[in-house]
């Protein structure tokens, strides 16, 4: 199983959003802040990322990708930096394409564009014209490519990343730094492992976004009341959490209907206690005890009147009086039915009779018994003289009134009247009792309320009984319930005992207890007033819980473990040996490559020195150029294990490298170009010369491209290098082309025109002689950059003959005379060489150079 296969299998176990991030990284897409924000938003909303599992072929640089790819051209540029539009940069199908351009020519713009479209360790943004005025045109470009199996394709700017182009590898100084840590540690990893490092970075950014939201969440905490500790309201407020339900909030903030009244009584009681003292409290308790006793006495009094026994007695007396009166009325109606006036014996008549008796016994006949029923006496009622019938009638009336039935009725009615006299006061609440209840209320409002209710109900019963006694048609009713007299007695006893026990200490306790009750009700009131803020806080806590859970889930240890396992399994000794080989090719001596522990997402490989007696980090020993070479060695190691043989692009790979390492790099790139398409962007003329010289020696085909400025406009492409950057072989080819044109156009040229063309040709021929001596002879033996002698090529000098020297001197001298380098003597008539002479001189240079190369290559 390959590293890419294992990574693809492992990624399936990761959260969907992480799979999506890795997929986008595989497509060389940039994960910006907006992407991180959306990831967090989706996590909070519970919206899973819709992803296609990362396949083995999606991973950059994987060994089972499709057949390799080579680049054909870059064209149709628009709005890319300030590059000229309508230009095309072409690449050779095989070998080495050298793209030369001076600083500011637009070379880096083309390199950035390629970096955007192919596979690079570090993504890059390609800007428009930062100096352009007005609205910038929409950016556009196209990269044409061909698969090594024969198919072709094209990738347009801002299109989805091309999987085919993803096989093309890109290197520049910034990408090289991905192989060398900021601490100058080699951290070579296959691209599959770099994805894990980037995934860790993305996880850190998601975690940072969640941290930011947690901070914002904390700032959203509503202002809740500061409640005294120990109160039930404070306890509830302190217990608020994400699981607090609305039912719990309602239960904690629901108040009884009389809460305000209770609170007012507690506040009033506390104010009273604060304003009082133990002596005053004793007096208050004694007064309360008396109030309890007053109410108790009233309860017992009414219980006697309207309790079961009292009610039975009242009913019995009333009914007895009614029955006796009914019997007396019957008797009177039978005795006096013949009387001239009706109603004798009725209640009205009896009252009249009793009034007459009192008048007779007190006023008219005080000395004689009533009635005075003697003839010729005066009647006390009508004041007329009595006759026989009148006297007899008075005697019959008197007999009726003293009859047993009437007497019994009268006695019963007097008893009922006495009962009424006791019931009528019971129908009202005496002032003294009301005052007593008011005194009891602050001490025991519940008992005062029960007593008040009982007394009012009992008064109502008394009124209903009085009505019934007058009118039995109103119906009977049940006896009153048990009176709270015993509770009143107990409360009175308790108040008396409390009064006897009270002292300063107990009084202080009572004050503090009252204070605590007031504090409790006030805290409860504040809690209720904050119910809206409480609901907001619970919602905030729920959101915070979710954020914290998501934050706790963003861990990178598992990614690091996977990177460590993959690194240990696949960055084997073979890879380490390849790295050492690449380092050695770049003249980095005695550099070793070994794991040095792990950190987020990767296993660090720290370079060291073989055989060093004193441990030292490479950044303390190697130069900046050597560290750059280490990064290049890491990239070349990865390319060495890339099996598709796709194109490799280098942008200024020798920046900050000295001549010695630069030539080693040139040799390594030429070697690489022998087996795959290699494209090199550079502004270094010496590096161009090294590349072309070594490529010619190794029979590796080269292709020249130049990017140049025209005035202030960069980005113009051509398929030849400028004269100053051309190697000897290219210069010879250029001269051959110019000579053919000169011969063809000779008949159309004036003498001054031909003279100028011939002199220009001769001057370039002279410069080519100088370049071939420098490149093909001198620099083979002595490195002109470092001054290093190359003894193995010293044989070249030994093989140069006197004839070779003479031919060089003659040909070079002749070309120099033909060239216009100095003002000619006015007395000397300058005659330009004929084209045949120029052709012969060029052939002599080619033959001479061929002999020099033969000397160098001959064992």
Image: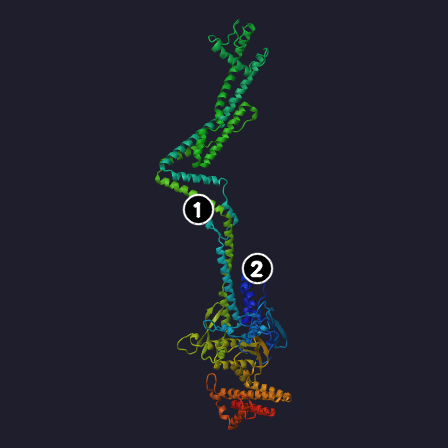
- Counting residues from the start of the chain, the first of labels 1 and 2 encountered is 2
Figure quadrant of residue 468: top right
Q: Nearer the viewer, residue 142 or 121?
A: 142
Against 815, residue 15 (above or below) is above
Q: Residues within 10 Å of mark 1 (few under 14, many from 20)?
A: some
Image position, residue 683 (x, y; %):
53, 78
Q: Which numbered circle lies on residue 231?
A: 1
Q: Nearer the viewer, residue 364 or 491?
A: 364
Q: Residues within 10 Å of mark 2 (few under 14, many from 20)?
A: few
| Residue that sits furthest to the top in the current view | 376
Residue drawn at 49 percent across, 20 percent down: 415
Q: Secondary structure at mark 1?
A: loop
| Residue that sits furthest to the left in the current view | 504
Residue labelled with disc 2: 47
Against 722, residue 513 (above or below) is above
Q: Which numbered circle lies on residue 569?
A: none
């Amino acid at each position: 199983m390959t590293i890419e296969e294992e990574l693809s299998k492992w990624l399936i176990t990761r959260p969907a959003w992480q799979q999506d991030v890795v997929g986008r990284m595989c497509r060389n897409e940039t994960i910006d802040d907006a992407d991180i924000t959306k990831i967090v938003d989706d996590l909070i909303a519970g919206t899973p990322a819709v992803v296609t599992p990362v396949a083995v072929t999606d991973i950059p640089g994987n060994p089972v990708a499709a057949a390799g790819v080579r680049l054909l051209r870059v064209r149709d540029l628009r709005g890319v930096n300030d590059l000229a539009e309508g230009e095309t940069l072409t690449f050779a199908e095989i070998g080495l394409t050298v793209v030369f351009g001076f600083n500011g020519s637009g070379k880096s713009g083309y390199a950035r564009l390629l970096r955007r479209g192919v596979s690079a360790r570090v993504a890059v943004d390609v800007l428009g014209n930062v100096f352009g005025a007005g609205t910038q045109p929409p950016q556009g470009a196209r990269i044409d490519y061909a698969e090594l199996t024969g198919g072709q394709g094209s990738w347009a700017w801002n299109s989805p990343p091309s999987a085919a182009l993803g096989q093309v590898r890109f290197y520049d100084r910034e990408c090289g730094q991905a192989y060398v840590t900021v601490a100058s540690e080699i951290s070579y990893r296959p691209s599959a492992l770099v994805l894990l490092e980037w995934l860790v970075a993305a996880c850190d950014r998601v975690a940072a976004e969640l941290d930011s939201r947690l901070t914002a969440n904390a700032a959203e905490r509503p202002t809740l009341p500061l409640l005294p500790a120990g109160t039930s309201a404070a306890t509830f407020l302190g217990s608020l959490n994400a699981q607090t339900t609305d039912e719990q909030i309602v239960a904690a903030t629901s108040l009884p209907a009389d809460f305000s009244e209770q609170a007012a009584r507690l506040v009033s009681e506390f104010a009273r206690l604060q304003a009082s003292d133990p002596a005053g409290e004793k007096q208050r308790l004694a007064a309360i005890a008396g109030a309890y006793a007053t109410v108790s006495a009233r309860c017992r009094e009414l219980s006697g009147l309207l309790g079961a026994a009292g009610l039975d007695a009242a009913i019995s007396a009333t009914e007895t009086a009614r029955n006796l009166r009914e019997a007396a009325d019957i008797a009177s109606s039978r005795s006096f039915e013949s009387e001239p006036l009706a109603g004798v014996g009725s209640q009205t008549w009896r009252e009249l009779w009793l009034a007459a008796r009192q008048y007779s016994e007190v006023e008219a006949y005080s000395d004689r018994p009533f009635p005075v029923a003697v003839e010729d006496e005066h009647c006390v009622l009508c004041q007329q003289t009595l006759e026989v019938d009148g006297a007899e009638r008075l005697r019959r009336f008197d007999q009726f009134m003293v009859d047993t039935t009437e007497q019994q009725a009268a006695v019963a009615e007097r008893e009922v009247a006495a009962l009424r006299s006791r019931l009528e006061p019971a129908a009202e609440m005496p002032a003294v009792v009301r005052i007593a209840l008011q005194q009891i209320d602050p001490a025991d409002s519940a008992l005062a309320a029960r007593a008040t209710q009982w007394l009012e109900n009992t008064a109502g019963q008394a009124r209903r009984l009085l009505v019934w006694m007058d009118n039995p048609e109103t119906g009977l009713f049940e006896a009153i319930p048990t009176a709270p007299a015993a509770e009143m007695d107990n409360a009175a006893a308790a108040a008396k005992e409390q009064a006897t026990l009270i002292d300063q200490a107990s009084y202080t306790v009572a004050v503090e207890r009252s204070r605590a009750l007031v504090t409790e009700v006030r805290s409860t009131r504040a809690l209720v007033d904050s119910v809206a803020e409480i609901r907001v806080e619970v919602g905030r806590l729920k959101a915070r819980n979710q954020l914290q859970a998501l934050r706790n889930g963003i861990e990178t240890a598992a990614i690091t473990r996977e990177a460590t396992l993959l690194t240990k399994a696949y960055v084997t000794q073979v890879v380490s040996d390849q790295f050492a080989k690449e380092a050695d090719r770049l003249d980095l001596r005695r550099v070793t490559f070994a794991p040095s522990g792990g950190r987020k997402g990767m296993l660090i490989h720290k370079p060291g020195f073989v055989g060093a007696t004193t441990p030292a980090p490479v950044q303390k020993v190697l130069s900046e150029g050597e560290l750059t070479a280490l990064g290049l060695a890491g990239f070349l190691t990865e390319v060495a294990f890339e099996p598709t043989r796709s194109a490799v692009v280098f942008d200024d790979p020798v920046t900050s490298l000295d001549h010695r390492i630069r030539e080693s790099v040139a040799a390594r790139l030429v070697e690489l170009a022998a087996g795959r398409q290699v494209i090199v962007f550079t502004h270094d003329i010496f590096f161009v010369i090294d590349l072309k010289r070594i490529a010619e020696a190794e029979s590796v085909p080269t292709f020249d491209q130049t990017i140049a400025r025209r005035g202030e406009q960069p980005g113009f492409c051509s398929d030849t290098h400028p004269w100053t950057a051309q190697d000897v072989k290219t210069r010879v080819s250029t001269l051959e082309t110019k000579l053919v044109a000169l011969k063809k156009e000779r008949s159309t040229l004036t003498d001054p025109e031909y003279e100028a063309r011939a002199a220009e040709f001769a001057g370039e021929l002279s410069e080519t002689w100088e370049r071939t001596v420098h490149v093909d002879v001198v620099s083979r033996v002595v490195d002109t950059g470092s001054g290093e002698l190359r003894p193995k090529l010293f044989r070249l000098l030994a093989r140069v003959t006197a004839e070779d020297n003479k031919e060089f001197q003659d040909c070079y001298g002749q070309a120099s005379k033909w060239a216009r380098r100095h003002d000619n003597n006015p007395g000397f008539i300058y005659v330009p060489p004929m084209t045949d002479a120029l052709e012969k001189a060029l052939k002599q240079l080619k033959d001479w150079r061929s002999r020099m190369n033969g000397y160098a290559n001959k064992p």
